[in-house]
Amino acid sequence: MADWPTTLPQVPLRAGYQNNLVDTVIRSNMGYGPAKLRQRTTSIMRSGQFQMHLDDAQKLILDQFYDDNMALPWTLAWPAPATQYRFTAPPQYQEITCDLWVVAVAAEVLP
């Protein structure tokens, strides 16, 4: 498990923050009557997305962190207590100015 780099922002922007429950129920249609339902897992799963402002140097650090940890869990101390995440997609960048980026990070919150 990796720790979120201290050289990157430790708190995301409020704009664009999402923290959603994941549907953990499997529905099977029957020939007639209501569908059968069963849980995939007993853990509560969440998916989320957050945004941060990064400069060029921080963008390179996040790219390297993603390359090294794309399939591994990592810890971010926000929100308290520290929460474990795992990337669900590569970071998406949008340039604001010549040295400032807004990055969208999609991740799942591990139970």
Image: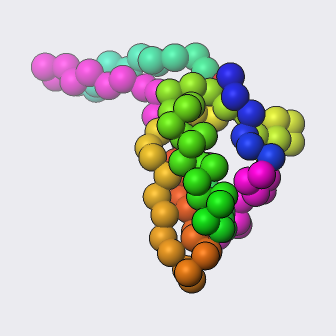
Q: Residue furthest right?
A: 81
Q: 88 or 19, which lies in front? A: 88
Q: Is residue 14 above or below residue 78?
A: below
Up-down relation of residue 101 to residue 103 (above or below): below
Does 95 sit left or right of 81 as displayed?
A: left
Q: Position of residue 9 (x, y in %)?
A: 76, 57
Residue 23 colored in magenta in the image: yes
Write the residue at 56% across / 31% down: 69
Residue located at (70% from left, 28% from top): 2
Over which residues does the magenta segment extend? 7-32
- Residue 57, horizontal then vertical, whole percent: 65, 60
**Magenta stretch containing residue 54, yes or no?**
no
The quadrant the N terminus occupies is top right
**Quadrant (top left, top right, bottom left, bottom right) of the C terminus:** top right
Q: Pick the residue in front: 79 or 44.
A: 79
Direction bottom: furthest residue: 97
Q: Which residue is painted at 57% across and 70% down in the image?
A: 101
Image quadrant where residue 66 sits: top right
Percent x, y of residue 29: 21, 24
